[in-house]
């Protein structure tokens, strides 16, 4: 049997190079593996856990779906869909809520971080990991490729699955988080001590957005924070975090070994050279995506057709498991 892969990304803002390296780029590679059955989702219900401007959210959902296509995800090879188009998620999330102890949610570090930034903390924000567990579990998922920050949420999904199986009999597959060895945590360019994040991507200099123009990308990288030295090597030294981050971006986008990357920079004259070459590699990776995106986003009819096709495929996969769970929990079908 093929291994089922499920992952999702929020349409909360423009996608940055950390999302691309830590998530989307790896999905494209996964799609080409004949042993895998891949499902990738625009998790719009997750985006609603913080305040959204309705028209802006709608635009972001369409843009993200178009970005899936632009990076090379193929609706005929993978299942690509929008979470709210398939009712299993909201419905299954509720069912899982009713077996998830509140104490488990209070421990989530992302909730603690995010709730500190909100004036009003919405119930959905606390409940977010249960909805994510529903995304994963109702698709009989084996592997969940995500960045480091989502590991705790996948572990919660495992705990929920185990608890359900214990109370109602073997039902859910216990999913594995799959975290990349390199690039699981791309750091901010203006502050390499913190993770590059969507919520700060609007700040100048913080992130490279996948759809940025080449000039903008170059400007952002040339301004990236480094140290006062000149040594171009991978390092765990916090002082060298800026250079390490630039090398990591370069490495993941070129697919080279760490040694080969360092050898590439043996003749570089200082960080200026490093930044210029990193910018070239980032532009080479993102420019075709930006151009493709421009084409896909223009054809709303085609986007809607593909969204519908993906949702139908997703429904076929998750609906039987939903019925099974309802039956086991004592509902009348
Ligand atoms: P988010 O931006 O939180 O919606 O995350 C979408 C996906 O990108 C998830 O799989 C994250 O783990 C991954 N991700 C987010 N930020 C980074 C980052 N700075 N470096 C690597 N992966 C990231
Ligand atoms: N919570 C994830 C994030 O912010 C997105 C997500 C929602 C997800 N459902 C998922 C990731 C299911 C993997 C599997 O990045």
Image (cartoon, grey):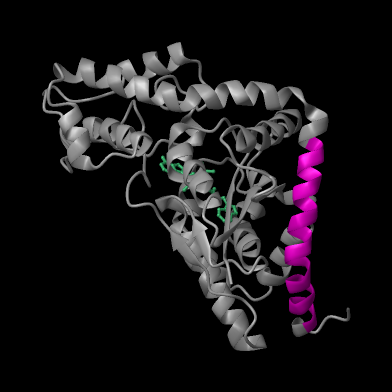
The N terminus lies in quadrant: bottom right
7, 312: nearer the viewer? 312
Name the residue: 40% across, 25% down: 282
**Numbered range of the magenta stretch:** 304-327
Which image quarter: residue 97? Answer: bottom right
126, 63: nearer the viewer? 63
Q: Residue furthest right?
A: 333
Q: Is residue 316 magenta?
A: yes
Number of labels in the image equals 0
Residue 91 visible to the viewer: no
Residue 212 visible to the viewer: yes
The C terminus lies in quadrant: bottom right
Question: Is the residue 162 above or below the residue 12 in the image?
Answer: below
Q: Seen in the image, is 163 located left or right of residue 221? A: right
Q: Seen in the image, is 319 located left or right of residue 222? A: right
Q: Position of residue 293 (x, y in %)?
A: 63, 26
Q: Seen in the image, is 73 located left or right of residue 241? A: right
Q: Position of residue 262 (x, y in %)?
A: 17, 33
Name the residue: 79% across, 58% down: 87
Name the residue: 65% across, 53% down: 124
């Amino acid at each position: 049997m093929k291994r089922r892969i499920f992952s999702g990304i929020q349409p909360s803002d423009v996608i940055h190079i950390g999302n691309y390296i830590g998530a989307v780029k790896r999905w494209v590679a996964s799609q080409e593996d004949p042993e895998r059955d891949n499902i990738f989702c625009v998790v719009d219900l997750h985006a609603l856990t913080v305040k959204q401007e309705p028209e802006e959210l709608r635009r972001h959902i369409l843009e993200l779906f178009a970005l899936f296509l632009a990076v090379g995800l193929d609706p005929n090879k993978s299942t690509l869909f929008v979470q709210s188009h398939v009712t299993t998620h909201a419905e299954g999330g509720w069912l899982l809520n009713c077996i998830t102890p509140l104490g488990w949610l209070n421990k989530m570090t992302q909730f603690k971080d995010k709730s500190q930034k909100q004036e009003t903390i919405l119930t959905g924000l606390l409940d977010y990991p249960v909805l994510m567990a529903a995304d994963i579990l109702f698709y009989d998922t084996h592997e969940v490729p995500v960045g480091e920050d989502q590991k705790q949420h996948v572990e919660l999904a495992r705990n929920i699955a185990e608890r359900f199986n214990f109370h109602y009999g073997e039902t859910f597959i216990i999913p594995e988080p799959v975290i990349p060895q390199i690039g699981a945590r791309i750091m901010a360019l203006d502050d390499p001590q913190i993770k590059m994040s969507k919520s700060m991507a609007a700040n100048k200099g913080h992130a490279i957005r996948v759809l940025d123009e080449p000039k903008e990308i170059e400007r952002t990288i040339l301004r990236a924070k480094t140290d006062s030295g000149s040594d171009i090597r991978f390092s765990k030294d916090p002082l060298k975090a800026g250079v390490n981050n630039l090398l990591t971006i370069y490495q993941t986008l070129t697919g080279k070994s760490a040694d080969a990357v360092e050898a590439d920079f043996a003749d570089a004259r200082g960080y200026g050279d490093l930044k210029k070459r990193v910018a070239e590699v980032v532009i080479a990776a993102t420019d075709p995506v930006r151009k493709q995106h421009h084409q896909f986003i223009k054809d709303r009819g085609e986007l809607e057709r593909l969204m519908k096709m993906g949702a139908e495929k997703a429904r076929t996969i998750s609906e039987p498991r939903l019925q099974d769970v309802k039956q086991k929990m004592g509902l009348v079908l």
